C-alpha cells in the first residue's frame, strides 16, 4: 500500500488483510502485466477487506482497476464500522482492464478498514488495485 505526495492511496488488490491467502472465492495470482492480482470467483461470494493508514481524514474517491467478462456483477464497500454499504458500479470491460466509476467514501485519519462484499455474481471479477484520491 502506497501514498503519493498528493495523498493518493494505492492499494494493490493482493494486499488484503482478510483473507491473506487464496480461498474458494478469492484467488491471488501473478498478473501478466506485473505484480499480483485478485480474482473473485463466480458463484462463490466471499467478503474481503483491507486495513491501511490514511494520511488525512476526509472524503476520498475510490476506484478499482479491474476486468470483467459480464455486465452482471456488483461490489459493495463499507468503511470502518459504518453499517451502510456503498454500491460500486462494476463496468462490463469486455475482458480488458478498466477503472470503475468513482464512489465517494469518508476516511478517518490513521487506521481505516474497507470491507468489500458482492452478491448475485454470475461471472468473476479480476482486480489489480484500488485507488483512493482525496476529494477537494
Image (tube, rainbow, N blue to C red):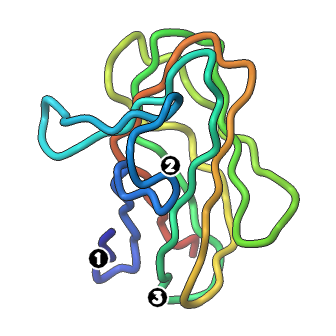
In which image quadrant can residue 112 be found?
bottom right
**Could you tell me which residue is drawn at 47 percent across and 36 percent down?**
23
Please identify the quadrant where the N terminus is shown: bottom left
Q: How many numbered marks appear?
A: 3
Label 1: how many residues lie within 10 Å, few (<14), some (14-19) or many (20+)?
few
Tell me if residue 95 comes above or below residue 127 in the rendering.
Answer: above
Label 1 and label 3: CA atoms lie apart by: 10 Å
Image location of residue 35, percent across then percent down: 16, 46
**Could you tell me which residue is drawn at 65 percent across and 36 percent down?**
75
Label 2: how many residues lie within 10 Å, few (<14), some (14-19) or many (20+)?
many
Label 2 and label 1: CA atoms lie apart by: 16 Å
Residue with the mark numbered 2 = 63
Image location of residue 101, percent across then percent down: 56, 40
**Could you tell me which residue is drawn at 63 percent across and 36 percent down?**
46
Label 3 and label 2: CA atoms lie apart by: 18 Å
Residue with the mark numbered 3 = 55
Q: Which of 2 and 44 is in front in this view?
A: 44
Residue with the mark numbered 1 = 4
Do the residues bearing badges 1 and 3 touch, measured as CB atoms within 8 Å?
no
In which image quadrant can residue 117 be found?
top right
In the image, taking residue 93 as reference, residue 97 lies left or right, namely left
- Identify the disc placed on residue 113: none
Amino acid at each position: 500500500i502506497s501514498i503519493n505526495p498528493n495523498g493518493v492511496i494505492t492499494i494493490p488488490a493482493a494486499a488484503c488483510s482478510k483473507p491473506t491467502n487464496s480461498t474458494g472465492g478469492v484467488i491471488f495470482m501473478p498478473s501478466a502485466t506485473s505484480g499480483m492480482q485478485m480474482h473473485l470467483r463466480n458463484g462463490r461470494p466471499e467478503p474481503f477487506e483491507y486495513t491501511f493508514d490514511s494520511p488525512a481524514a476526509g472524503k476520498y474517491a475510490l476506484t478499482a482497476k479491474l476486468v470483467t467478462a459480464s455486465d452482471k456483477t456488483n461490489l459493495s464497500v463499507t468503511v470502518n464500522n459504518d453499517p451502510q454499504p456503498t454500491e460500486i458500479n462494476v463496468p462490463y470491460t469486455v475482458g480488458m482492464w478498466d477503472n470503475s466509476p468513482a464512489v465517494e467514501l469518508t476516511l478517518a485519519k490513521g487506521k481505516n478498514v474497507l470491507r468489500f462484499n458482492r452478491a448475485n455474481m454470475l461471472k468473476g471479477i479480476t482486480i489489480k488495485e484500488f485507488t483512493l484520491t482525496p476529494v477537494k
